[in-house]
Image (cartoon, rainbow, N blue to C red):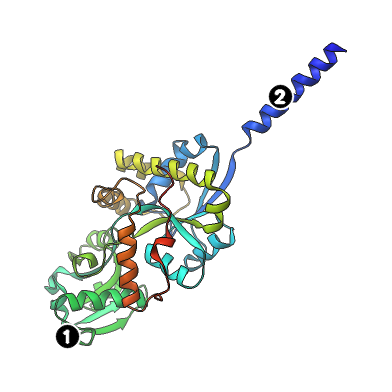
Amino acid sequence: MKKLVLLVAVIASMFIAACGSGDPEDIVVTLDWFQNANHAGIYEAVDKGYFEDEGLNVSVVPPADPSAILSLIASGESDFAMYYQPDLLQARNEGIPVVAVAGVVQRPLNSMMALKSSGITRPADLAGKKVGTPGLPWNEAMLTTMLEADGLSRDDVELVDIGWTLNQSLMAGTVDAVIGVYWTHELIVLENEGYETNVLLPDDWGVPSYYELILVTSEKTVKDRPEMVEKFVKAFNKGYGQALDDPQGSIDTLIRLNPDAEIDEAVDRAGVDLLVPLWESNGQPVGSLVGERWDSLGDWMKAQSLIDTSVVPSDAFDSSFGD
C-alpha cells in the first residue's frame, strides 16, 4: 500500500512539474512589409533562440494586406506587428485599440528625394517643380510643412499622384522630386541603378522627428497577457542588440531564414549600415519610447487635420516593457 501511495505521489509530482514547465506559447508577428533590413533584429531573436529562452514560439510573417495589419492586431489574429507611429495614431483616431510597446527605428525614414542633376537641395528649390506623391494625406502634409519651413507653400509646386511608382517616375523624369521614399532603401536602389540623388529629411524641415517603425500590440494583450508582452519585448530588443553588434551577420540571418523571399541582398546590406545608428538614437537605447516625441508628433498631426484633437498620444504607447 505504501508503495502504491509513493508511486501515485511520484506520478503526480511529475505531472505537476510538466504542467509547470508548460509548452512554448505560440506567438504570431506580422511585418509591416516584405522582409528587409528593417527586420534584421527580429530574425536574430528567432535565430539565436532569444524568444525560445522566454518560452515563446514565434512565427514572423509578411503581411497579406499591409493596410489591414492593425486590424489584425486589434482582433487578436496576430499578436504583434511592426508598423509606423503615424499610422498607429491614425488608427487610434478611428477607434482601433492598438498600442506601441517598443521603438524600432527611432527616426523618420520617409523622405523627399530628387536626382542630384536637378540641383534640388532644399525645399525652396522646388518652386515651380513637379513633386510626385503616393497620394496619401500623410505625405502631402509632410510636404506642406517642409515647403513652409523654407518659405514656400503647396501652391508653389505641382503635386502629381504617381502611386508607388516613385523611383520609376524620378528616373523617367516624369517628376522633379518625390516624397514617400525611404532613404535607407529607395536611395540605395537608385544608386545601384547609377542615379545620384539628393535627400531631404522631413525632420530637418519642420516635421517632428518620429519613430518610423514601432512594435505594436493590442490594448487587450497588454491588459490580459502582460507577462508574455514583457518576455517578448525583452527578447525582441535583445535581437536588435545582436543586429547592432553584427549588422552584416544579421543580414546573413535574414537571408537564411527567408529562403523563399525576394530579398535584394545588395540593397539590404547597404541599408542595414544606415539603420544601425537609428536603432539606438539620441542616446536612447534599443526599444525605447519617449513621451515627448509622441506629444510633438500628435500635436503636428492635429494641426495638419490628420487626427482629431481628442486623440491622446500618451495613451498610444506603453514603455514599461523590456527594461
Residue 262 lies in quadrant: bottom left
Residue 308 lies in quadrant: bottom left
Residue 33 lies in quadrant: bottom left
In the picture, the disc for residue 186 is none
Q: Which residue is mark 2?
A: 14
Residue most extreme to the top: 2
Q: In the figure, is residue 186 to the left or right of 78?
A: left
Query: How many numbered circles does the render carry?
Result: 2
Residue 106: percent from left, percent from top: 30, 55
Residue 32 visible, this angle = yes
Residue 264: percent from left, percent from top: 35, 54
Going by the numbered disc 2, the residue's amino acid type is: Met
Q: Nearer the viewer, residue 157 or 116?
A: 157
Residue at position x 39%, y 56% in the image: 214
Q: Nearer the viewer, residue 9 or 200?
A: 9
Crowdedness near tag 2: few (<14), some (14–19) or many (≥20) residues, C-alpha within 10 Å: few
Crowdedness near tag 1: few (<14), some (14–19) or many (≥20) residues, C-alpha within 10 Å: few
Q: In the figure, is residue 21 to the left or right of 134?
A: right
Residue at position x 21%, y 70% in the image: 206
Q: Which residue is mark 1?
A: 128
Q: CA distance from mark 1 to mark 2?
A: 77 Å
Residue 256 visible, this angle = no
Going by the numbered disc 1, the residue's amino acid type is: Gly
**From what the image shows, is residue 41 above or below residue 162?**
above
**From what the image shows, is residue 155 above or below residue 95?**
below
Residue most extreme to the right: 1
Q: Say what secondary structure mark 1 lies in.
A: loop
Residue most extreme to the bottom: 155
